Image (spheres, rainbow, N blue to C red):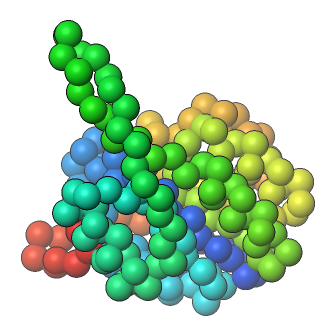
């Protein structure tokens, strides 16, 4: 398996699944969680892979969390909130569960033990975290798509490496006959 990333020591991975899963419709292909895990496991520097996803009663969500645990991810979850959104005088309940704060706090708890951090999220709210990690001489890799990358992250001038998800597509794409993870 090709190694695209050049890691500089002990590394932790943070997968914000709501963001990553949200990319699939626009990508027009699905990410296979098991294949993603196997690809990352190929890097001996990666010592921990964390998976963030909200808990609710929907069977697909419950299965996704179970699957992530079974595959080997360390799963962080919390209850999903449902927010009312009005659309043409109809109220739609939108699923919402942000993990930006949890990811940031987890990074800083791990700061002294890790040299690098890989983030699967393009969220612009994470830019401050990335800048602070860079100031502490940590390697920061952001995996996203060009259209999901927040401008705040794209504007960081030095210290982070942005990897377009398409570069690892052949390693992580769910094939129609390869069924794993939800």
In this rendering, position of residue 30 left or right of residue 50: left
Residue 140 or residue 2, whichever sits in front:
140
In this rendering, position of residue 38 left or right of residue 121: left
Compared with 166, 114 (above or below) is: below
Q: Is the N terminus in the top left, top right, bottom left or bottom right quadrant?
A: bottom left
Q: Where's residue 59, x and y in %?
A: 19, 63
Compared with 129, 32 (above or below) is: below
Q: Where's residue 171, x and y in %?
A: 36, 73
Residue at image point 64% right, 74% down: 12
Residue at image point 32% right, 23% down: 85
Residue at image point 63% right, 57% down: 102
**Count of picture labels:** 0
Residue 139 or residue 99, whichever sits in front:
99
Instruction: Quadrant for residue 14, please give it.
Output: bottom right
Residue placed farthest to the top in the image? 89
Residue 78 in view of the camera: yes
Instruction: Quadrant for residue 108, please give it.
Output: bottom right
Q: Where's residue 32, x and y in %?
A: 29, 70
Residue 162 in view of the camera: no
Q: Is the C terminus in the top left, top right, bottom left or bottom right quadrant?
A: bottom left
Q: Where's residue 168, x and y in %?
A: 42, 66
Compared with 7, 87 (above or below) is: above
Residue placed farthest to the right in the image? 136
In this rendering, position of residue 85 left or right of residue 164: left
Residue placed farthest to the left in the image? 177
In this rendering, position of residue 117 left or right of residue 143: right
């Amino acid at each position: 398996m090709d190694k695209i990333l050049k890691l500089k020591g002990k590394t932790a991975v943070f997968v914000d699944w709501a963001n990553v899963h949200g990319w699939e419709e626009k990508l027009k292909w699905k990410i296979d969680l098991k294949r993603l895990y196997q690809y990352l496991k190929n890097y001996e520097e990666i010592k921990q892979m964390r998976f963030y996803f909200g808990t609710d009663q929907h069977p697909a969500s419950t299965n996704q969390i179970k699957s992530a645990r079974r595959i080997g991810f360390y799963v962080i979850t919390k209850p999903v909130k449902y927010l009312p959104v009005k659309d043409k005088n109809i109220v739609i309940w939108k699923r919402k569960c942000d993990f930006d704060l949890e990811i940031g706090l987890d990074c800083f708890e791990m700061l002294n033990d890790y040299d690098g951090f890989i983030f699967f999220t393009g969220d612009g709210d994470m830019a401050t975290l990335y800048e602070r990690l860079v100031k502490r001489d940590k390697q920061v890799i952001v995996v996203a798509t060009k259209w999901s990358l927040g401008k705040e992250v794209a504007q960081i001038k030095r210290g982070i490496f942005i990897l377009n998800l398409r570069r690892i597509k052949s390693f992580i794409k769910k094939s129609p006959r390869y069924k794993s993870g939800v």
